[in-house]
Image (tube, rainbow, N blue to C red):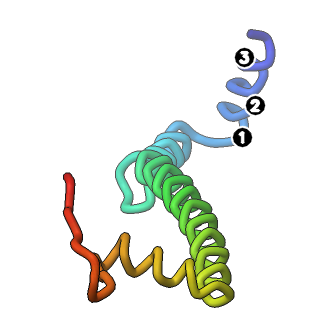
Amino acid sequence: MKIFKSIFNYLITRYTKVQLLIILVIIFFAFFISDSNIFARFGYDAKIMELNSQIDYYREKTEQDKEKLKLLESDKDQIEKFARENYLLKKDDEDVFVVE
């Protein structure tokens, strides 16, 4: 509490009341009313964190897809399996039943 009193006394002796009022108004405007206020800053930080988590998710997804692509490029049986599962392709002598 002594620290606040000493700071307050220092400000009162250094500046006039009008100057202090102007400084307080400028600080209030800068932190609460302007376009880049403190609440917008917190919102931007939250958005940045969300976007960074999306970046991490898509990087992992890309790595998984690269592994699948390598597997498909290396094995003909895997290509057939992929085509059957995703595109419902079949051989001429087969019947395909889709169960959902």
Rendered image quadrant of residue 5 = top right
* On screen, residue 48 above or below 85: above
Q: Nearer the viewer, residue 81 or 7?
A: 81
Q: What residue is shown with label 3? A: 5
Disc 1/disc 2 C-alpha distance (Å): 6 Å
Q: Which residue is located at x 55 percent, y 41 percent? A: 20
Name the disc covering residue 14, or none.
1
Q: Residue furthest front?
A: 93
* Image marks 1 and 2: residues in contact by CB distance under 8 Å: yes
Rendered location of residue 46, percent (x, y): 49, 49
In the drawing, does residue 16 fall left or right of residue 33?
A: right
* On screen, residue 83 above or below 12: below
Q: Which residue is located at x 42 percent, y 53 percent? A: 40
Q: Which residue is located at x 46 percent, y 56 percent? A: 47
> Disc 1 marks which amino acid?
Arg
Q: Nearer the viewer, residue 28 or 11?
A: 28
Rendered location of residue 90, percent (x, y): 30, 81
Rendered image quadrant of residue 34 = bottom left
